DNA sequence: CGGTACGTTGAATCCGATCAAAGCGTGTGG
DNA sequence: CCACACGCTTTGATCGGATTCAACGTACCG
């Protein structure tokens, strides 16, 4: 069974999240694009570079065109939380606060489209198609965020990693071979685990023959049924 | 320091979440209410009764007018996850799927306003103010859901309960004395802990003099600073 | 070559889960 | 009115999965 099949049940378009009140989306280039294009500019970000930082004035919203970015926050005591990984088609930055409450960094070279926040908000206020698109995007992102809460609240380390791998494969549109753009530490902070636990769990999956690893960032899912079974259908609830 | 002060930093209006792609909100009765009122009806639900069940056709969206409801889901293996508790002003049911993916039950007698889903969606499609209100509500709900993910991923049992109590006090609009409408099991399934751990943590807080308990559902927050300190500012990030 | 950053593996520890039993409160029926 | 049962909560003892601490391996780069 392919990953796509597992994920077909989802809302069709793979939908990620976004940052603090900002939403992630599967924005479609279609009719109304004209209005959006009028205020858009493009931006290339090299691997490791930040797009914005927690605390900066939130003056723009972005769409990922290619590459992958990591959205993260720090707790006062230094613990880091990875809010999400965003891929092509995802939006972020529609925060309601004056400032960003997340840091966004490229983990692969990425190309973004930039929408000035004031102008995008003004457009949404008066343009029904834009408003509806953002509304739908936010709804989908909310749905994804709630599934993630369930994952974090109820699943074990193995279950979390299995769900993560399947979700990622679905979002990246691959069926078996999955090039992981992020490092173990990123995955750990995303899943609420430690680096060591993530690493050990990868090893377990490998020794059970559920995945193959050709280097730490190149995973092949060899037994998707087992992984899906373990993941408790967290990402197939909207069946 | 009062709980309100701790929470003033939040988006003004206390904003809860909603169910699967549906959003929770602080809906304001204002100008455009006319259009919404035209399709609204009211509904009283007694404590313990269900408003809708996971798997039912999702034919309506609701706003809580009074009381409190619990939104929950079951994993295939029987584990339960409490997605949220909703109070007066909160919305739920704007799911994108054909069916509800959550069960919603009253934990206090509650009064709801019911909006037929097809008509509400049609209204949002053509009415800019309604669309914008839903868009904002979804954004706020998303922001809240992301804070909750951080809580679940990074905080210890004590930190989670402290954050929960402060959040609840803020949402219920009380400063110190907090009538808990939900039982220990509900809190456990909301925070990703067990009943026993929740109970023990309440006891710890009591013996440290941070809270007083007059019966298990009547809590008084006596040292909010300590609780806020423990909660790592998870609910004050949008400062 | 070192050096550095990342990943894996091992051993010890700890927090929260699990198993078990005992309190408590409320409501119902004898 | 009391006895009892049932549901919820608290507390105790033990277990186990994930973290922590530590070491080693590996790849990349100056």
Image (cartoon, coloured by chain):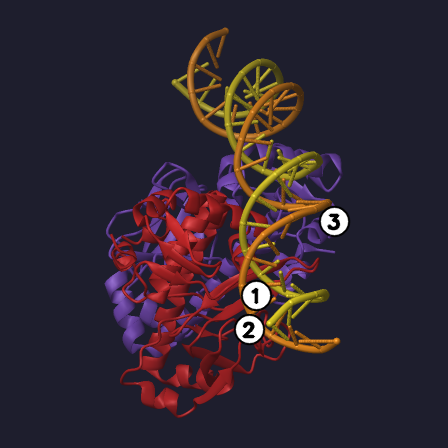
Chain colours: A purple, B red, C orange, D yellow
Camera-side residue of B38 and A8: B38
Residue B155 image position (x, y, % from top left): 46, 44
Subunit under mark 2: B
Q: In the displayed image of the protein, which residue is found farthest to the bottom?
A: B38
Give SS at disc 3: helix
Residue B123 image position (x, y, % from top left): 41, 86
Residue B89 image position (x, y, % from top left): 38, 74
- Which label's residue is closer to the chain start, 1 or 2? 1
Left or right: where B176 falls relative to B44: left
Q: Quadrant of residue A126?
A: bottom left
Q: Which residue is mark 2?
A: B105
**Residue A23 visible in the snapshot:** no
Q: Quadrant of residue A128?
A: bottom left
Q: Are marks 1 and 2 in contact (CB under 8 Å)?
A: yes
Q: Residue drawn at (46%, 43%), measured in percent from left and top?
A: B204
Please identify, in this view, whether the residue under mark 1 or under mark 2 is nearer the observer: 2
* Rendered image: mark on residue A226: 3
Subunit under mark 3: A
Circle 2: is it few (<14), some (14-19), or many (20+) Cα within 10 Å? many
* Rendered image: mark on residue B190: none
* Rendered image: mark on residue B72: 1
Q: Residue drawn at (37%, 36%), measured in percent from left and top?
A: A78
Left or right: where A146 falls relative to B27: right
Q: Is residue A57 above or below residue B59?
A: above
Circle 1: is it few (<14), some (14-19), or many (20+) Cα within 10 Å? many
Give SS at disc 1: strand
Camera-side residue of B32 and C11: C11
Subunit under mark 1: B
**Residue A8 visible in the snapshot:** yes
Give SS at disc 2: strand
């Amino acid at each position: 069974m392919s990953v796509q099949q597992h994920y077909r049940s989802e809302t069709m378009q793979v939908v990620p999240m976004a940052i603090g009140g900002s939403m992630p989306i599967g924005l479609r280039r279609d009719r109304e694009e004209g209005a959006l294009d009028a205020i858009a500019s493009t931006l290339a970000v090299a691997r490791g570079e930040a797009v914005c930082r927690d605390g900066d004035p939130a003056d723009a919203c972005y769409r990922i065109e290619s590459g992958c970015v990591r959205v993260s926050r720090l707790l006062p005591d230094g613990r880091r939380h990875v809010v999400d990984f965003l891929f092509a088609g995802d939006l972020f930055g529609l925060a309601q606060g004056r400032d960003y409450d997340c840091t966004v960094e490229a983990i692969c070279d990425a190309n973004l489209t930039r929408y000035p926040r004031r102008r995008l908000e003004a457009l949404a206020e008066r343009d029904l198609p834009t408003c509806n698109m953002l509304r739908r995007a936010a709804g989908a992102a909310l749905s994804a965020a709630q599934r993630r809460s369930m994952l974090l609240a109820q699943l074990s380390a193995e279950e979390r990693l299995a769900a993560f791998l399947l979700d990622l494969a679905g979002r990246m549109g691959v069926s078996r071979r999955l090039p992981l753009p992020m490092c173990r530490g990123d995955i750990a902070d995303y899943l609420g685990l430690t680096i060591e636990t993530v690493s050990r769990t990868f090893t377990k999956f490998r020794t059970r023959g559920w995945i193959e690893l050709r280097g730490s960032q190149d995973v092949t899912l060899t037994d998707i049924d087992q992984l899906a079974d373990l993941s408790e259908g967290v990402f197939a609830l909207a069946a």
